[in-house]
Image: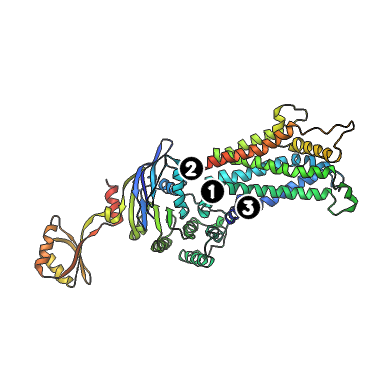
Amino acid sequence: MRTFLRVLEWTFRNDFVEPFIEIVLFIIIFIAASSTFINPGGNTQIFSSLTWNLIYIIVILVGIGGVRSYSLGLERGEVVRQMSSLRLTRSGFLWRKWLSLYLIFASMLLITDAIIFFEDFGFFPNPTLASNWGSFGLLTWVFMVPEQLALLVFLNSLVAILSLVFRNTTVSLLIYFVYTFLGVSLYTVSHLGVASYLQLGYGDYQIVNTASDHYFYLLYQPYNTIGLRVSALNAAFYVGVIYRVVGGLIMLVLAALRFRGMDLD
Amino acid sequence: MKISLRGVSKSFGSTHALRSVTLEFSEGVNLLLGPNGSGKTTLINVLAGITYPDSGTITIDGLEFRAERRGEWRKGVRLLTSRMGLLSDKPGYPPNYSGLDLLRFSIPPEADPDDAKEWLHEIIGTLEMEGYISRRIAGYSSGMVQRLGVAASLVARPSLILWDEPIANLDAKSRLAVVELAKKVVSAGSTLIVASHILAEFEPVTNWLGIMRLGEMVVSGTIDELGGTTGTYLAETDSPVELARVLLEHGVVKSLTLGPDSVRFVMEENRDFALESLIGGSGIRVRSLRRELMKPSEIYRKYEAV
């Protein structure tokens, strides 16, 4: 645990040059807040498009942080410095670094989510907005948080594998941006192909909205007007979740295997 | 700790960085010498687990690990890295840390805090880093950074220390301070492996020498094994003046230096055979007579010239 905290501290203080994180956090909150009217209780639909509003800055932040930690860290000898100073094995180092980056990104997103949550619910406790509690908006927020955490698993692992395979900061970042921006822009409302399931940005559409719709009706209106149960979650939901979580974990395993077998000089 | 390598090779594309290197390190200070590009850094990196060799074997305290099986090699290197202090050619210092932050970062969590603090201050004091150790590393000069690297490699009290060019950017005083620390850690039982193209400062403390050229280990071994003897003799006696007179009268020495209870002299060519009978016949009591061993620099010149 103590070695993990040291890697986390290194990542926070060195891989992100202070006050990079603070600036990015401000931008994230600004983007999130300005994407809707500051109108407490007025627009809970922001939760169903929050990831979409933030996706570019999430992608950019994870890309820069990851490439800085892995590719540039290898080029500058910082990876070896951390491993030798803390006497870590290669896999021991990789999971600590991955988790450090993950926790930093996740904390920033959770802070944003929390601020938007309280903004929308009138800064609890606000008795005039009591009806919002237990509403569709709340359910959407509940699904949006794990959806964003799953997105981070994918992006964090993607940047790890690219950085360790190409070992060149510029090339790794370029390929990462091409892949992720393409993933973001795959979304079109009318797109019916598999590609629409593999989008990165609009997980709040394929995952959050599908799940919150489904569970809202399951919880509050299990039978529709003609007495039939609500339909099951669709393929887009499962593909989206599996793509992010399982895909992310597979890439992490591949990154670990690559890291174990490579020369670090 | 006994470490030996057998047939270790490593190529980067068409460049053969190590060509079937075989050696056995000794305890104390082990010095790897060779010009730039001779493979010293690659060898240090192989020992540090940074680079995997293509082939060969490493033996650590009697346990053998083969490079052809990477998992096996990793296990072997893990035995070294778990007790190793490293100063590598790419030291990778975090610019936003202070030197003190980095040194504290390198202290093992399980270390006794009082002991660690005392040792930390001793290192900082010996290397005269007090004036800047609390400043951000980003503002350090190359010499400051070099001293920090040496300090960081020692702070965990490792039993194996690998240094790649530890004195390259240092002034004369700092070089001596580094050698002073080397003596200290070696006397505490650590094994030190130093790759350097600078010999002078480490010469007095070196007891093992490896000379590399173009990826090959030209020769390696302890100074006793490699050096052989020079043409210089050292005779310890209570009558140095009388002994010097005898040697000069018989015209067998080229040069001669008197000590308070010894005579150091260089024999004329092919006159060594007469020495013992000459001294024996003089009636002068000589406590010991021996040929001096070659210094590392002399050994280096001898083999580098081959």
Q: Chain of mark 2?
A: A
- The reply, left or right, for residue A163 in relation to residue A216 is left
- For disc 2, the marked residue is A263
Residue sitting farthest toward the top: A193
- Give whichever of discs 3 and 1 has the lower sequence position: 3
Mark 3 closeness class: few <14, some 14–19, many ≥20 residues within 10 Å = some
User: Would you place residue A177 above or below residue B130 in this image?
Assistant: above
Task: Find the distance from the CA under tag 3 to the CA under tag 1.
Answer: 14 Å
Identified at 34% across, 58% down, the residue is B206
Q: Is residue B229 above or below residue A169?
A: below
Image coords of residue A177 (percent x, y): 64, 37
Front in this rendered view, residue A247 or B187: A247
**Coloration mode:** rainbow
- Residue highlighted by disc 1: A79
Amino acid type assigned to the residue bearing label 2 in the image = Asp
The answer to which of A255 and B240 lies nearer the viewer is A255
Q: Which percent across, then down, holds residue B190?
A: 41, 59
Pointer 3 chain = A
Q: A150 or B272: nearer the eye?
A: A150
The image position of residue B123, as x and y in percent, is 47, 64
Whole-angstrom CA distance, mark 1 to mark 2, is 12 Å
- Residue hosting label 3: A12
- How crowded pointer 1 is (Cα within 10 Å; few <14, some 14-19, many 20+) is rated as many
In-image side of A125 versus A20 (left or right): right
Residue type pointed to by label 3: Phe
For numbered disc 1, what is the local secondary structure?
helix
- What element does badge 2 sit on? loop
